[in-house]
Image (cartoon, rainbow, N blue to C red):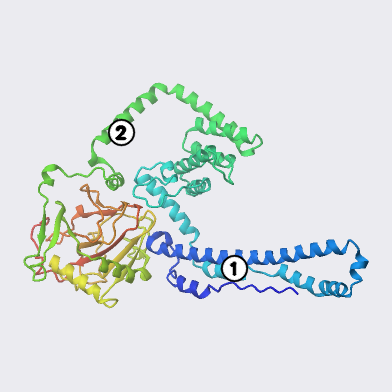
């Protein structure tokens, strides 16, 4: 008699424990630290899937054994059916098989071994990344491509600086990036990634996509950028592969008409256009000469790449490193800290080895379950809201969470000489895929009189920024107005004043966090406010002193 019992290991409790940390399941792409939990989630799913496969294989093996046994028995019995059934035991077993065992076999074939896997998948699916996460991660790749001037091929082949795990993008991956750019009416990136997908197809990569689909997007995105002749070439290639492609047939006629029209217009205006182009080229060359005339965005991206840093040898010679005890503070007289000048105007100083490995891990451990999408204050409404130019998650920590936070706050007070009671809580931030924070001020400007009114502690007088991780590539803190760049160094901290002693804002402190190209960037910062500093940093009567 057949007997079959299948048990899938119950992973539900394990998975629920694993998923508690994913409760804030939106905006995964904005924090690499929280994305690591997804790897363990996927690992559990693979374990559950393999258990299902083993159960199916066991089931099929049982069915195969039964079929093989009956095949042998039937072959023998049909040689002489009457003689075979003349044996009373054979007659009994035939009745038993057809009445009972074939019914059990039917139950075995119909038995569902998917329950365990499907239930685990259902539990976890509610914590999966959303379309927004996928789109956000895709746009981050496009942002990195622009900021660091990477070719589509460089990204697709995983040839990035400082990578430990080199990963290749498939044709489908490239196509997906192109489609997301296309849906954003970003035809420039659509062209780059559809061209990369086409290149990989032509190199023989196996794919469920065909060249016709890719060429359709490619030709149209090129046309939208005004290059009708190239769009026409790709449309002809498409029609060679699929002569009956209706849209391409229509585009062919339209592109030919537009190209002929364009050529006639160019011939008529050739002299005039040439003069205009020469003038334009001269203007562009003039722009390239002066870094001061570049738009802030360009200066920001250049600094992120390590270009355009405006530090002359003479100014560099005035920057020093030293052992620092902040005017003989008792805590640092015998063990002063290492301090080095990073920039002169504004004065930015770095403290080395100021946060231990144990403290870094503890802060990250406390912050991780509290991480939420970082917000900005709307300058018009004052309401906190998310923004595409700030891609990170943050958490706020106090001494109530752990006494170590009070120890860290006291250390900042001892080294800066500033009052911490009126400072904001320690903010911990973890950057996501291509994580960044575009140029901004930490202090409230004159057109934002109510920026920190609810705190009642005045403006942000200074910023203290801990670097809690090294970053393999990218992730610098840059000051576009002065051409300064400060690179992350684990365990160090940088400090600068946002306000002059007069209380006026120092607009040269406008800064940004460059996109993280490779690595996982953790920082924590302390925004120090004016109240309580009256005797610690006396006011000046000169506006810019």
Q: Position of residue 153 (x, y in %)?
A: 43, 41
The image shows residue 175, relative to residue 282, as above or below, that is below
Which corner quadrant of the image does residue 429 belong to?
bottom left
Q: Would you name the residue on which mark 1 appears?
A: 118
Q: Residue furthest right?
A: 82
Of the pair 451 and 485, the residue shown nearer to us: 485
Q: Would you name the residue on which mark 2 appears?
A: 284
How many C-alpha atoms fall within 10 Å of the one at disc 1: few (<14), some, or many (≥20)?
A: some
Of the pair 7 and 49, the residue shown nearer to us: 7
The image shows residue 124, relative to residue 342, as above or below, that is below
Secondary structure beneath dot 2 equals helix
Q: Is residue 393 left or right of residue 487?
A: right
Give the residue at x 84% y 61%.
Answer: 75
Give the residue at x 44% y 70%.
Answer: 23
Q: Position of residue 297 (x, y in %)?
A: 31, 47
Secondary structure beneath dot 1 equals helix
Mark positioned earlier in the residue sequence (1 or 2): 1
């Amino acid at each position: 008699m057949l007997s079959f019992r299948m048990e899938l290991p119950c992973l539900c409790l394990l998975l629920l424990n694993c998923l508690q940390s994913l409760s804030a399941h939106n905006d995964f792409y904005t924090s690499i630290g929280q994305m690591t939990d997804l790897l363990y989630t996927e690992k559990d799913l693979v374990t559950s899937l393999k258990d299902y496969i083993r159960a199916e294989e066991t089931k099929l093996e049982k069915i195969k054994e039964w079929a093989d046994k009956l095949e042998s028995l039937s072959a023998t019995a049909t040689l002489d059916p009457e003689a075979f059934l003349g044996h009373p035991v054979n007659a009994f077993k035939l009745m038993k098989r057809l009445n009972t065992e074939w019914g059990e076999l039917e139950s075995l074939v119909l038995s569902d071994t998917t329950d365990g896997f499907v239930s685990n998948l259902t539990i976890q699916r509610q914590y999966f990344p959303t379309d927004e996460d996928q789109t956000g991660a895709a746009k981050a790749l496009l942002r990195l491509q622009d900021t660091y001037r990477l070719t589509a091929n460089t990204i697709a082949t995983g040839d990035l600086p400082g990578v430990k795990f080199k990963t290749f993008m498939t044709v489908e991956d490239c196509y997906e990036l192109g489609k997301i750019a296309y849906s954003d009416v970003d035809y420039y990136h659509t062209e780059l990634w559809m061209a990369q997908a086409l290149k990989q197809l032509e190199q023989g990569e196996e794919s469920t996509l065909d060249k016709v689909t890719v060429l359709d997007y490619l030709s149209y995105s090129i046309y939208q950028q005004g290059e009708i002749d190239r769009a026409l070439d790709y449309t002809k290639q498409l029609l060679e592969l699929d002569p009956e492609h209706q849209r391409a047939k229509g585009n062919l006629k339209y592109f030919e008409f537009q190209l002929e029209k364009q050529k006639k217009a160019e011939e008529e205006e050739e002299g005039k256009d040439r003069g205009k182009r020469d003038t334009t080229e001269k203007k562009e060359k003039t722009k390239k000469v002066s870094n001061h005339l570049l738009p802030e965005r360009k200066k920001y991206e250049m600094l992120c790449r390590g270009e355009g840093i405006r530090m002359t040898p003479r100014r560099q010679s005035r920057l020093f490193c030293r052992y620092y005890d902040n005017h003989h503070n008792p805590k640092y007289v015998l063990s002063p800290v290492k301090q080095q000048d990073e920039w002169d105007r504004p004065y930015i100083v770095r403290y080395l080895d100021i946060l231990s490995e144990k403290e870094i891990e503890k802060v990250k451990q406390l912050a991780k379950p509290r991480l939420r999408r970082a917000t900005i204050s709307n300058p018009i409404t004052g309401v906190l809201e998310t923004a595409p130019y700030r891609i990170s998650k943050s958490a706020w920590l106090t001494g109530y969470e752990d006494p170590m936070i009070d120890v860290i706050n006291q250390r900042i007070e001892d080294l800066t000489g500033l009052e911490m009671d009126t400072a904001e809580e320690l903010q911990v931030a973890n950057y996501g895929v291509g994580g960044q924070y575009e140029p901004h001020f930490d202090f409230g400007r004159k057109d934002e009189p109510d920026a920190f009114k609810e705190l009642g502690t005045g403006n942000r007088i200074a910023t203290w920024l801990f670097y809690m991780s090294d970053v393999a590539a990218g992730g610098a803190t840059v000051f576009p107005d002065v051409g300064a760049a400060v690179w992350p160094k684990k365990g160090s901290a940088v400090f600068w004043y946002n306000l002059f002693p007069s209380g006026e804002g120092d607009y040269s402190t406008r800064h940004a966090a460059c996109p993280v190209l490779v690595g996982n960037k953790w920082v924590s910062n302390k925004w120090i406010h004016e109240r309580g500093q009256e005797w610690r940093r006396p006011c000046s009567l000169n506006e810019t002193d």
